[in-house]
Image (spheres, helix red, strand yellow):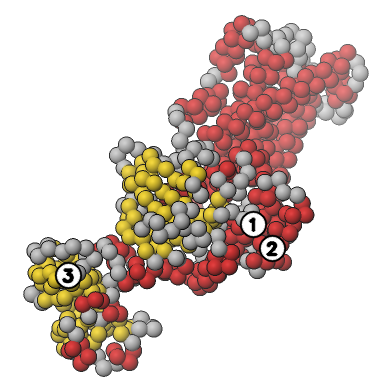
Amino acid sequence: MSGQFDPFLQFIDVQKAYDSTTMVVKSLNLNVANGEFLTLLGPSGSGKTTTLMMLAGFEEPTSGEIRLQGRSMNGIPPHKRGVGMVFQNYSLFPHMTVGENLAFPLQARGMNKAEQTTRIRTALDMVKLGAFADRRPGQLSGGQQQRVALARALVFEPELVLMDEPLGALDKQLRDHMQLEIKHLHDRIGVTVVYVTHDQTEALVMSDRIAVFNEGRIQQIAPPAEIYQNPETDFVAQFIGENNRIEATIKQVSGNQCQLVLKDGANVLANSPRKAEAGEARVLSVRPEMIVVGPDAHELANSYESKVREIVYLGDHVRVILGFGGIDDLSIKLTHRRAAKLSVGDHVRFGWKPEDCRAL
Amino acid sequence: MVNTSLERASNLAVAVVSLLVLLFLIVPLLVAIPLSFNLEPYFTYPMPGYSLRWYAEIFGSSANGVAWHAAFANSLFIGLCACAVATVLGTMASFGLNREDVPFRGLVQGLLLSPLVVPVVVFATGSVYFFARLSLVGTYTGLIIAHALLGVPYVVITVTAALSGFDNNLYRAGVSLGATPLSVFRRVVLPLIAPGVASGAVFAFVVSWDEIIVTLFLAYPEQHTVPRRLWAGVNEQLSPVVIAASTILFIITLGLLFATEYLRRRNERLLGSA
């Protein structure tokens, strides 16, 4: 994984424990390239926020080292790191105007008034809030406040910006909009971003790479498409996107493809991301949208028949649920047109390609 | 809904009891204050006539008046100094104790608040012995330190309350933007907890302003404060001057409390609805 990127930011064997029994972050090794947008994705308590806090300097690693541009960050207090940060609840100073909020980091750097004014104007224009310099944060909407927070974290031109669930407090529509706005901002100014979220959509939309955290470890780190299409662990498959999980046992192996037997005796061909051995217990992962229904399914290497148990209408698509392979809730995502021919109780043929199914 | 009459009766009872408690608290004041306007040097109703002569005596330039002036000046000086010391130390202590990783946090907090629960006489006795070794008995420094210690708990309580409503991410945001912790405290934390600090300061001042026990123990015979003069007045030459002085003391205290409340509301309004 390393070598492929410049070591702009490195985590070397970083560990963090708050007490002697629980390790919050376990031997973290991670390289981030200059200009990269890296998302730390995981459920709460997975160690992603702690990782960010260590990067910001609010927490010290118990062991290991964080290097930024080759310089060790151990023991360097937050205000000397020169790292911008955006918080979930905006954290704008409520007693200062928007302009004063943006001036704060510039004053801390002893910048002269004229230069401050230019920088503040540029930063506010960048987030399309040029006319708001004299407002107080309390007079702005949540989305506007978050844009001010972004501008404030960028106005002193840090090389690295950290974002801690910055869109968590916004409603869904605004969140979707802000995701693209942050992405475009990043594309335009090329700053390195480390972004923490538990929202997989956010991660998929914005990131160059996603690091999926669970129980203090990175489960997989890869570009969004790779994470979604080729999850390496059961946790990643389950955490990102919808997933059908079927327990299986390996019967035969040929290369990275293997044949597995399900609890109801059905045989399935699937890819395995790691070395497989016959007799091993695995969990099959199939995305609902990868399952084909109808006569076309006959020609697929994995082709089966079952009875429709339930049809769920979801607006932009329809979910068909049927029993298969020892589970009774195999979920299939279909367009309205395809689902129109189906009704509950029908026997349908369905199937998927071996490469759309992974034995994890 | 079944026992509405019972509920109504109990509500009434609560109201009556509350009213009685309030009356009990306020009646002594209501009785005493008018007496300071009494024409005659007696403490009985009905009053034969009204006059401002007792106030004139305090504000006037008679020997007695000059002594009162000195007492007010002393009280003000000691009060302001004690208030300043208590506010600075109390605010810093509260800010430090606001962090969760402070060792012995509860113990330290308890010690800081202990002047509230330790009987003042005990505190005063201890102060005399301790301060005697430092040659602080009978000095302004000694009185100011003792009064400041009595005021610290009030500052700690109000500032801690203010900090509990303070979003610590604002502090983090401040340092992440490159400002030193001290400058973040001065420019971000302090303005936002200012109402708490101000009311703590007022309490600290008022504690010193009407403090008598420690003053009796520590002060020089000539070192008069207003409460000490009142005490002497009650013991020696009981006259409505004492009540007039008490009324002035009371009005100043009341004014301070109103002022902080006004500042608090103004601050709330300025920060607007987030």
**Label 2 packing within 10 angstroms: few (<14), some (14-19), many (20+):** some
Chain letter, disc 3 residue:
A
Mark 3 sits on what residue?
A: A255
- For residue A122, the mark is 2
Classify residue A228 by image quadrant.
bottom left
Which type of secondary structure does the marked residue at label 1 adopt? loop
- How far apart, in angstroms, are the residues tagged by discs 3 and 1? 53 Å
Viewer-nearest residue: A258 or B57: A258
Instruction: Give the amino acid at mark 1.
Output: Val
Mark 1 sits on what residue?
A: A155
Viewer-nearest residue: A163 or B28: A163
Counting residues from the start of the chain, the first of labels 3 and 1 encountered is 1
Classify residue A140 by image quadrant.
bottom right
- Residue depicted at x 67% and y 46%: A109
Viewer-nearest residue: A50 or B236: A50
- Say whether residue A282 is left or right of residue A13: left
- Residue depicted at x 73% and y 59%: A118
Which type of secondary structure does the marked residue at label 2 adopt? helix
Tag in front: 3 or 1: 3
Q: Can the viewer see residue A229 in this picture?
A: yes
Classify residue B121 by image quadrant.
top right
Which type of secondary structure does the marked residue at label 3 adopt? loop
Instruction: Give the amino acid at mark 2.
Output: Thr
- How far apart, in angstroms, are the residues tagged by discs 1 and 2? 8 Å
Q: Position of residue A92 (x, y in %)?
A: 61, 54
**Label 3 packing within 10 angstroms: few (<14), some (14-19), many (20+):** few
